[in-house]
Every structure is written in C-alpha cells, then in structure tokens.
Image (spheres, rainbow, N blue to C red):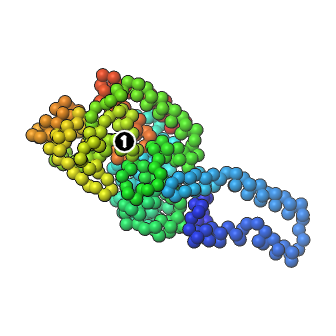
Amino acid sequence: MQRRTFLKTGSSAALAALVAGCNSPNEGSSDDTSTETQAPTDTTEETTAAETTESEETTQTDASYSVSMTPVGEVTFESTPESIAPYMPGYADMLVALGHGDAIESVGQKGRFHTGPYEELDGVSVDESEMVDLIKQEISRETLLDIDPDLFLMDPNWLTNVFEMTGEDVSFLEERAAPFLGNTIFRRTDSWHDYDYYTLYGAFEKVAEIVQEQERYEAFKSFHDDYVGRVGEKVPSEGPRGALVWGGANNPKSFSPYHLSGEGANKKSFHDLNVRDVIANSDVEALSEGTRSKVDYETLLDLDPEVLFVRGHEGKSAEEFQNTVVSFMQDHEAASRITAVENGDVYRGGPIFMGPIQHLFLTERFATELYPDQFSGDLFDRDELAGIVTS
C-alpha cells in the first residue's frame, strides 16, 4: 500500500490500521519535539521548509478525487490510475473509448473482448498481447495479486458468487494490491445482485470519472445521442418479433434462451431498434444465474420469431455464419419452418459483454440487417468518433 496513491474509504479495520500505520510517522508534528534538544537552526530556513511542505501537502490534497459506485462505495484517488484490471470486456471497451486502452491489464476472456470495431477507427487500437486472460489463468487471489494493478475495475460480488473466491480474498487484495470498483451490468438476472444496477452509459460515466476523462465522455455521449436519435427516427415503433438465444456450435440443435427485453447492458441495441421479445411472454424460462434452461427447434417453431439472433458466433463473419449455422438450420426439418429461417432473418446475436464503441457498431449492424429499406452503409462518421477517442 505504501506505493499506492489511493485507498478505499470505509474499508476494513485492518486496512484502516495499515494506512494509519503507514502515514502517522511522517505527518504533522510527531517528530517536532525532538528539535528541542537539537542545536538551533536558522528560523528562516525552518519557515521556508515548513511552507514548502505545507504547499506540497495542499497540492496533493487538491489533486485527489473520489468516485462512488455500488456495491463498493467510495474510492478516493490521489492520481489517475495507470494500470487497471477489468473482468468484463465491456469495461475494457470503455477504457479504450476514453483513450486509456493502454491501461488495461486483464479481461475475463480475451475471446470475448471483440476488438474488430477498432480497426475501422483511425488511431484506435489496443495491445492484447500482455493482457491477462483471467479464465485461462484461473480466478484466484494469486492471479489477481500477480497482476498488481492500480485498480481492479470489477464487481467483487461477481468474483465471490461466480468463482471460488471469498470476501476474505477480496479484503486481502484490497490491502495488498488495489481497491475494487465496478458493477455487474451485462445482465440483470443474478439473485445475489440485490443492489443498484447501472445502464451502459451510467457505468461508462463512472469509468470516465475514474480516469478523469469527463469531457471526452460528454463528447462521446453527445455523439451517441445524436446517432441513436437519428436511427430511432427511421425505426418503426413496433419492430419485428425476435428471439435471442445462445448456440455456439456450427450445427446447433438446442439453445439457451435470453430475454431480449431484459435491461442488461448487452440488450441496449435491441431496445434502440424496438425489437420485440417473443420469449418474454411465453412459458419459456430465460437463461439466468440459477436457470440453465434449453429449448429445441420445436419450441422455437412454436414461438415462431420473425428474426432469430444466435449468440456465440461473434468470431465469425456474416458470410461464415450463413455458411455454417444458417445453412444447417435451412436443412433441418423443424428449423426450416421457423419464419426467421424461412425468410433468411437469422443473425449473429452480438457480444455478451458490450462497451460503448462496440454498441455503436452493433446497432449499425442490426439496423442494416433488420431494416434494409431504411438503412445501408455506414450509419455514423468513423473519423469523428476516432477523433473523440484519440483527441
């Protein structure tokens, strides 16, 4: 903790004691009494030194700032964190959007950090070669301690409820490495998540506060608002009846269903484009922390969505997806009778963990697929967006 430039307020008594122990010998007048037995010194030099010390302390205090985010609460920073360890790739995308991609030390799974959109933005890139893949390395106290970041940009409750970590592990990491700050926003189906959620942009704004990029955030949000507003003007108030499922195989025979109407951050593009949810009003249980439900083609045929979104294929191009998954469905006796399959409206379902840059591109992709008569080509200015990210 001695080399850290921040601490988590309101943390454990042990951490408070540690901080107090680190600071007290060097602060205030604790050593002043020893000067009484020393030889006299020049009072002008003493006054100048005292003023310099006071000035330095004032400057350090003025530079500090705090960010509050549930469930952790308030974290105070004395300087901008330069190395940050997210779990959710959506948070990594936020850091890229704010011009701090080089601060990213980790992601939950590199395969789910979809960086393809950066290739269309001049000057925007991220080096994944040194990022720790937390799933490959195994989520543990040791793995996170070895990363040794300035901040763990992750919800500690995600670690203790999904992986074999404990509250004691979290406290240990806070004391020995860095504070935690983050909220699980990609879905809203976890029973343990009984505290406030954030929208995609609500969390994005918090990350902007962390890295002190509020102006860049406001510029990005303005770009987003204008873009989504323009698209929304051409989107019908009632979009197609859609189903969102997970089926990662090239020849999927069963699927895990989601609620398109869910409020998780990864559903934002569907909401922006007014896609209706055929699963929400059915007897089908959507995928959640405690429910690993499955549906087959007969069930999907009963639901008969007009569009079908299949997750698990973001690594494929649209053509590769058509030549594998869609081709298999078209040759399947039951699947071929689903309206979405008959009409050729089966699409890749987008990433599970989505950030603000990825959302802009995904909304464009879905808009041109769902409403080809209204949308085609690029729906937003790449150069303008790149300018915001790199300015």
**Total number of numbered discs in the rendering:** 1
Name the quadrant of the N terminus: bottom right
Front residue of this view, candidates 214 and 147? 214
Residue 222 visible in the picture: yes
Residue 61 image position (x, y, % from top left): 70, 55
Indicate whether 233 appears above or below 74: above
Front residue of this view, candidates 360 and 166? 166
Q: Residue furthest bottom?
A: 37
SS class, disc 1: helix
Q: Identify which residue is drawn at 27% across, 37% down.
A: 242
- Within 10 Å of disc 1 (Cα), the crowding (few <14, some 14-19, many 20+) is many
Residue 310 image position (x, y, % from top left): 26, 42
Q: In this figure, which residue is indicated by the disc labeled 1?
A: 267
Name the quadrant of the C terminus: top right
- The answer to whether residue 341 is left or right of residue 369 is left
Front residue of this view, candidates 351 and 384? 351
Residue 57 image position (x, y, % from top left): 73, 57
Residue 15 image position (x, y, % from top left): 58, 68
Q: Identify which residue is drawn at 20% across, 34% down.
A: 340
Q: Identify which residue is drawn at 29% across, 43% down.
A: 280
Amino acid type indicated by mark 1: Lys
